Image (cartoon, grey):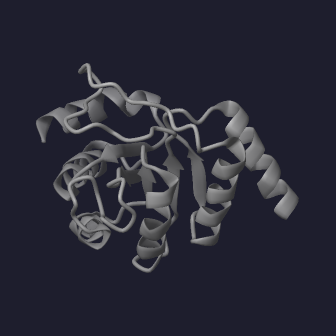
Amino acid sequence: MPIYEAMVKTLNPFVDLYMCETMSTADEAYNAASAAKRCGEGRPVYVAWTLSEEPGAGLRSLEPVSAAFERVSSLSLDGYLFNCTTPEAVLPALKELRALTDKPIGCYVNRIAEVPEAWTLDNEHQTHRRTDLTQDYYVQLSLAAIEAGANIVGGCCGIGPEDIAALNRAVQDAA
């Protein structure tokens, strides 16, 4: 896609790797990642899909994780993640993804209660913060993601530096 190629070429002087993130369909991920591979001057390329809120339901498009992985498999990407997704939806997806690849996998989850239908970054649909996803629960679920095979774990919408610091302490304590 020309728009992705233009973005990659513009960013080339300033980046160390490409993260094609919040991809909600298999084709969207393929289009972004193939442009990054083609025009990214050999930099690593990762893809991060966003998942349905229902655990095990696949991407937001409802395509299975395995189909999304298969769609980009010919690109020899450097890693695969899930982002801007509830931690509960990530755990089964990580287990499925780990069975498909030995490359780095991971997640950076959000604290949004539910992504509204037709939500985009530039419209007026409001998101609401989860009150049940406490810092302790975030750390517990992040440690479960590591147990499920995640090599990379972080945070997206609503996860702050204090949450990441608590996760870092928990990982250090477990080592």
Residue at image coords 29%, 47%: 23
Residue at image coords 23%, 21%: 123
Q: Is residue 43 depicted above or below 55 in this figure?
A: above
Q: Is residue 38 depicted above or below 79 in this figure?
A: above
Left or right: residue 157 compared with residue 47: right
Q: Is residue 160 visible?
A: yes
Left or right: residue 144 compared with residue 25: right
Residue at image coords 42%, 71%: 97
The quarter of the image holding the N terminus is: top left
The quarter of the image holding the C terminus is: bottom right
In depth, the one of 72 and 2 nearer the eye is 72
Residue 91: x and y in percent read 50, 65
Q: Residue furthest bottom?
A: 99
Q: Is residue 165 depicted above or below 99 in this figure?
A: above
Residue at image coords 63%, 56%: 142
In depth, the one of 175 and 15 nearer the eye is 175
Residue 130: x and y in percent read 52, 38
Residue 53: x and y in percent read 36, 53
